[in-house]
Amino acid sequence: MSERVLTVEGLATAFPGPAGPVRVVDDVSFHVDRGEVLALVGESGCGKSMTAFSLLRLVPRPGRIVAGRIELAGRDVLALPVTEMRAVRGREAAMIFQEPMTSLNPVQTVGVQVVEAIRLHERIGADAARRRTVELFERVGIPDPGARFDAWPHQLSGGMKQRVMIAMALCSRPKLLVADEPTTALDVTIQAQILDLLREIQRETGMSILLITHDLGIVNELADRVAVMYAARFVEEGSRTAILGAARHPYSQGLLRSIPARARRGVRLAEIGGTVPPPEDWGPGCRFAGRCERVLDHCAAERPGALRVGEGHQVCCHAVARDLAAATREAAR
Amino acid sequence: MSGPLLRVEGLRTWFPIKRGLLQRTVGHVRAVDDVSFEVPVGGTLALVGESGCGKTTVGLSLLRLVEPQAGHAWFDGEDLLALPEEAMRERRKAIQIVFQDPMASLDPRMRIRDALVEGMQSFGVGADEAERTERVAALLARVQLDPDSMWRYPHEFSGGQRQRICIARALSVEPRLIVCDESVSALDVSIQSQILNLLSDLQDERGLSYLFITHDLSVVRYLADRVAVMYLGQIVEEGEAERIFAEPAHPYTRGLLAAVPSVDPAVRRVTAQVRGDVPSPSRPPSGCRFHTRCPEVFERCSREAPALYPVADGQARCFLRDPAGQAG
């Protein structure tokens, strides 16, 4: 039995809206095992980043977690006092973001910032912390790490800054790394370098990664399992090969088909018609119903439950449920 | 397709670096350094490269939104870069530009109708206000927006809808060439495919030509007839789109293509072939500008600058393609 690093049950995070609180994360449940990479994938505004922020209790005000349970490395995150929560961040779980520049202090050298992060979690002398920082810089592929210790953030390229952020995240050997669009702001050749690095470090340390991304290519590169989010809810979850190779939810299928990389000149791209509905238009049923090619009469009115369609593969869709029921009847005949 | 609509020759746009009290010029950022290409009539040239390669400056230079120092841009038999300012303003009717961020290119205080009429007024499209309003309605319908939405403001639309508005605005003056500068890069993939299909349909309907500037190779494959790959201010490879994807000739093009993650679950392939960071365009490396990151570098590369050598239907700036032999 593999070790659970993270268990999330019925998580809901809400922001006040003109017509009452809006749940930007709505009844989300998942888990991450030791050494596993789970990708949360979805388009802007689907709630994937807010899910990540919720795990570390970093939801920006006036948003707040309104329901659910989060267990991180055996601790009930939502019950911890603020001071203990601070210790959990960094030691149990660390986070890296899309924009490394906004996460680094512009008026302090990068080395000093990593030293501070180390000494926040460990009683260790300044010299030892400095040596550890240089080792970490070397490990994350920063050339001439000794000299770069004294560099200012603005002197580093986007890729180098992201390496610094990774070094900082690794400094207290967390069990879980939450990576929120870690390569989105980077050029593709630099993105490839960072993906290589994340994969190596994950194998070396055995840490788990919760990867937040909109890019199914990156999912394919790093993830073991994938959860697809749409309008604050999970719509499908399964192994990398199940989701990328045999997705069942019409939204996951539409996303995969509309990727232009598979297209050719003159061959029309598949589209998902319409746009994501704003929260005020979210009805009681499936939130994808308004754009769905396979919509049924009851889709907009009834929320589809999670349906098991394969080993560790579940999907929330009335049309898939009907397919399954039909297949069962067929088999019984 | 026949002949080029636009032929760019030896385009050079350098930006001075000024230092000190007297603001003396101490060097130049060689944003665009001797760039030549053609955009076919009714076709698409994709200009591809990573941040800082100069691709955006090429687009801005052609519209003379920045002034290039040298080169020609032949459009309809006229050199755009030699035209007096007044005459150039006229030509901007024929060449429109659609940027990445539609919110930044739409005035937040202007109704959509007024934003679309502005260009028509200055170029004398449409006889009177009533006719222009009618044209706005038709344009909005064409980009699949409700014509009645012309009375609304930009913030009332989603990102994808705003980009449709920017496309309608570009179309409003009946251009022949549209420069699309990262026009779909900020959009979610489900919206991106809608806009790409729209651009493709408009091209077929109206015989439009596109100069499609992007960092994203995956969108290029869908839209481009020809591709030019830029690195540090220069074109390093140019040719027919299908061939570039199937048989890239330049090591940089190969590295770019290899770096794009696939969504095929049977293919987990990304390995970083291209090492390190892009050097500064104010001090490009000696010899071949790519030699500091090239997986196939050899001695001659740092010593001598390669020319563009012929490759199949195009050209590549790499000594491996030198007909006189790699060693020179």
Image: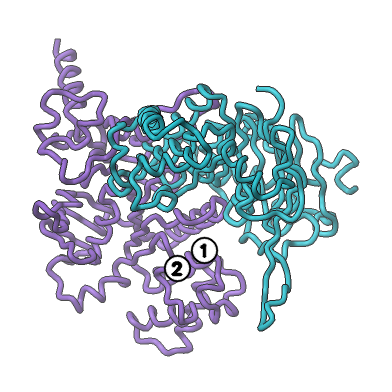
Chain colours: A purple, B cyan
Q: Chain of mark 1?
A: A
**Residue B19, x across and y down, in percent:** 67, 77
Residue annotated with mark 2:
A101
| Amino acid bearing label 2 | Met
Near mark 2 (Cα within 10 A), the count class, few <14, some 14-19 or many ≥20, is some
Q: Nearer the viewer, residue B265 or A216?
A: A216
Q: Is residue A190 left or right of residue A77?
A: right
Are circles 2 and 1 on residues that touch, CB within 8 Å? yes
Q: Where, by quadrant of the figure, is residue B258 drawn?
A: top right
Where residue B200 sits in the image (x, y, percent)?
50, 28
Rendering coords of residue B232 (x, y %): 68, 55
Is A225 or A263 nearer to us in this picture?
A263
Q: Chain of mark 2?
A: A
Q: Quadrant of residue A275?
A: top left
Quadrant location of the N terminus of chain B in the rendered image: top right
Label 2 vs label 1: CA separation? 8 Å
Q: Quadrant of residue A314 in the image?
A: top left
Asked which secondary structure carries label 1, the reply is helix
Whether residue A239 is situated above or below residue B293 in the rendered picture: above
- Seen at 17% across and 65% down, the residue is A62
Residue at (33, 55) in percent of width and height? A210
Q: What count of labels does the image hold?
A: 2
The residue wearing badge 1 is A158
Tell me if I can see residue B100 in this picture: yes
Helix, strand or loop at mark 2: helix
Q: Nearer the viewer, residue A194 or A254?
A: A254
- x and y, in percent, of residue A45 in the image: 28, 49
Residue type for callout 1: Gly
Task: Mark 2 or mark 1: name the one nearer the start of the chain.
Answer: 2
